[in-house]
Amino acid sequence: MEMKGKVIKYGDNVDTDVIIPARYLNTSDHKELASHCMEDLDKTFTQRVQDGDIMVAGWNFGCGSSREHAPIAIKASGISLVIAKSFARIFYRNSINIGLAIVESPEAADAISEGDVISVDLNNGILHNETTDEDYQVEPFPAFIQTIIANGGLVESIKNGSIQ
Amino acid sequence: MGMTMTQKILAAHAGLDSVEAGQLILVNLDLVLGNDITSPVAIKAFQNMGKKEVFDKQKVTMVMDHFAPNKDIKAAQQCMMCRDFCDIQDITNFYDVGEMGIEHALLPEKGLVVSGDAVIGADSHTCTYGALGAFSTGVGSTDMACGMAIGKAWFKVPSAIKFVLKGKLHPYISGKDVILHIIGMIGVDGALYKSMEFVGDGLASLSMADRLCMANMAIEAGAKNGIFAVDEITKAYVKEHSNREPVVYEADADAVYEKVYEIDLSEIQHTVAFPHLPENTHTMEEIRNMDEIKIQQVVIGSCTNGRLEDLKAAAEIMQGKKIAKHVRCIVIPATQKIYLEAMEAGYLKTFIECGAVVSTPTCGPCLGGYMGILAENERAVATTNRNFIGRMGHVDSEIYLASPEVAAASAITGKISAPEEVL
């Protein structure tokens, strides 16, 4: 899995209420959710995000509610990858289940700055910062999770019988 | 190597003799839960999985509680989608307006969860049922769909932090103060991916309402689950509410814990979490030394503190008094049964006479849905579980998380106050 994009960076404890406020949870339409993504934290996000951009954040990204609408909104905004120092556990599994690429790396999250361009080779666990010409190595996912990712998410994994 | 209580439940439900932290397993589920916000996404995923029928119509439950009674047309459509699905699937435990309550207060009351169960819910506060000695955790909608389809969920076996409770709480101090104290101590990611296991002699002084409240907020420390050792109080509660036989799991004597904290309940004070994280806790003693914190709204309710014991505690403090001018106090019994019992006990009369309003059960204001949204620069004291930016309304509003006792006292004085100040 390879991707490349410009970085939009946030801090620690970015919660699901700011990723997608509950007042918009009366729908599960992906585009509509994306149109309000990050609204309570960063009003400029939806205007400046471009397809392929990479979100970088600090500790405990996605804490709070179990709403899958949060990774859905981020993915539907065009974000190709979220790099964080750590992820809240429900957000972590939701991202894997719906096929939003995520990477846990305190080192990369610290070193990467807003606006940097990052190219990613997830199969080999390498993040390359084209702006600063730095490389960051990341841990590959365990085999079971790689199966879900390879199938394109949990729905497909159930549908094709690879999880039963 | 010995297993924790959580690991034992997971091993048994994965058909394994033993498991260890970090291992990835598929777990057989006793119950799969969804609400009116998360279920529509799950229903779509379920249909996309190509499944026609749920794995067991008695082990799937849906509760219309977040935006129900329907707050707007879109919410109405979402509830309709859940209702239609449950009709077609002939789901035994579908709870709509009239029967519903806030899911995590309702399920234990209906006896749908007993000790030893493995439960997932597409709601982060599903960890509440750990109070009953069950493994119970919040997941997303796709996990819920998977649960409905095959009756299983994938998990990484968690390591654990043990909390050994001793002593006894002082009057007007409750489970909410204990869990806020703990979150203040370990932080909002202090138990990330881990179990929080509560054991010790101190359990004897904690009611089931206290325990449900504490397990409920395990997620606010990042935990996968919170779980209480099963004792006579648990057994009596389960026997009263369920026909199902509980299975009691105990941690092995040589179980490994990442950390062990000893907590003397007699040292717990009134504890309030300041904006905008549940870890920003202050004791009432610290608050007394600050400038007074004026409030415009009080919410007493939610899956954390909407139980009969919570309403009783608030009513006893508010009895015969008046809500402060310019304060709106909203009381929300968590289930229909609690509503009725609070009515019969006279608590609702007390609330109304002192100027509070009483709402039908709903999650409503807790997540900024409806029934008490905050305006710009307004402050609320709430017995709810999260005080994130904009959680209860305007992005520039503030939420202070507290016990029902502190919330009731604050409604009377119009500022954050201890119950002792108004009694």
Image (cartoon, coloured by chain):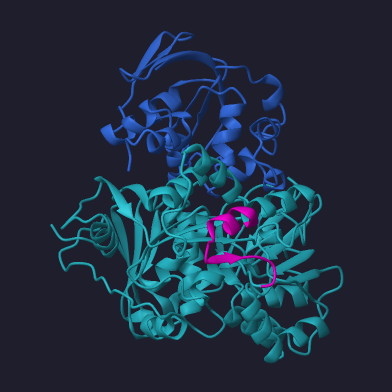
Chain colours: A blue, B cyan
> Measured along the vertical axis of the image, is residue B90 above or below residue B170?
above
Q: Is residue B38 visible?
A: no
- The residue drawn where x is 81% and y is 49% is B376
Q: Position of residue B383 (x, y in %)?
A: 63, 67
Residue B3's image quarter?
bottom left
Q: Please state if A80 lies on the left or on the right of B82 as rendered.
A: left
Residue nearer the viewer, B421 or B100: B100
Q: Residue at x 61, y 38 (%)?
A: A19
Q: Tell which residue pokes out farthest to the left in this image.
A: B1
Per the rendered image, the range of residues in magenta is: B83-98
Q: Position of residue B148 (x, y in %)?
A: 45, 52
Q: Which residue is at 15% across, 64% downward?
A: B254
Note whether A21 is above or below B190 in the view shown: above
In-image side of B50 versus B17 (left or right): right
Q: Confirm whether residue B116 shows in the render.
A: yes
Q: Nearer the viewer, residue B259 or A75?
A: A75
B142 in the magenta segment: no
Residue at the extreme right of the image, as rendered? B325
Quarter holding the C terminus of chain B? bottom right
Looking at this view, is B165 or B209 the one in front? B209
| Residue B9 position in % (x across, y down) | 28, 62
Q: Quadrant of residue B399?
A: bottom right
- Residue B87, magenta (yes or no): yes
